[in-house]
Amino acid sequence: MTLLLLAGTGEAQQIATGLAAEGISATVSLAGATRSPKKFPLPTRIGGFGGGTGFEAYLAAESITAVLDATHPFAARISARTHDICAARALPYAQVIRPPWTPSPGDIWTMINAEEEEAEAHIPEGATVFLATGRQTLERFSGLTGRRLYCRQIDPPEGPFPFAGGEFLIGRPPFSVADEVALFKRLGVDWLVVKNAGGALSATKLEAARALQIPVLMINRPPPTPGPILTSVEAALGWARAL
């Protein structure tokens, strides 16, 4: 058996460590969104496959016998394509999705589905907005004219902010609650915009928003793939063992 682990989350790092410890043959694949990703204890490839045709060619060339999808919960297009190709080739496939965040007492959340259509309606002009959504979907917020926008990313930007009123911040997680509280105070943040990715490490910004009573625009997840859903590292390792 040769397992392909599609990585991109903290859970993927833990799964890779478990697979290596148990001697399960596997290769990690990273999309290459981060220039200096953390190292994995397994053979690792970085970069896209060249679409569906390229992915199928890779599966055949590397004799991949199963695919474990531990990409970001919002990587819906990649997950759907992977599921469909695995189904067509009769390859075992499962998606690892951590539970979503749910509001706690004191949270001020507004749930939305499409930030490019709904963000402008909820965030007033003149507000200072912290976009914790990543640079890949930054263009969806181009309608937030008249607001001050901050977008945090791991790597230094390769160009200026794509529209007026915005600024990049550079930082590599994890961030403590105290770190986030201090940052939000320094920037004068009025609104926090977050994708509902789930996970304890990324939740510190939500705890900081609760402490400061900053309203949160929470973007709902896309639907998962039709295949098996695993909600923990332990479940993912159990699935791999059973192959």
Image: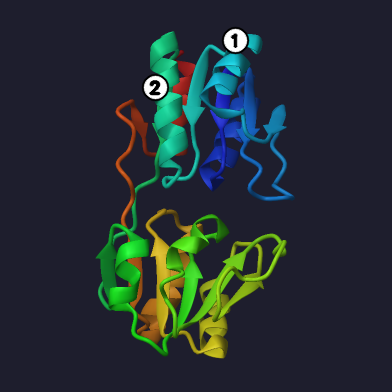
Mark 1: which secondary structure? helix
Q: As drawn, is 38 to the left or to the right of 16?
A: right
* Residue 133 shows up from this direction: no
Q: How is the image coloured?
A: rainbow
| Residue 121 tag number | none
**Residue at 37% over, 82% down:** 214
* Residue 192 position within the rendered picture, expressed as x and y whole percent measured from the top left: 42, 74
Residue position for label 1: 60
Query: Vertical placement of 74 versus 173: above or below?
Result: above
Q: Nearer the viewer, residue 62 or 181?
A: 62
Q: Position of residue 106 (x, y in %)?
A: 28, 78
Q: Which residue is mark 2?
A: 84
> In what element is the residue under mark 2?
helix
Towards the viewer: 219 or 40: 219
Q: Is residue 212 above or below residue 238?
A: below
- Disc 1 packing (10 Å; few <14; some 14–19; many ≥20): few
The N terminus, quarter of image: top right
Left or right: 95 with respect to 22?
left
Q: Tell me which label, 1 or 2, sits earlier in the chain.
A: 1
Determine which quarter of the picture holds residue 112. Answer: bottom left
Looking at the picture, how far across and down is residue 230, in whole percent? 37, 33
Residue type, mark 2 in image: Asp
At 44% from the left edge and 62% from the top edge, which residue is drawn? 140
Residue 83 x %, y %: 40, 24
Quadrant assignment, res 119: bottom left
What residue type is disc 1 on? Answer: Ala
Mark pair 1, 2: CA separation = 15 Å
- Residue at (70% x, 64% y) in the render: 157
How many marks overall? 2
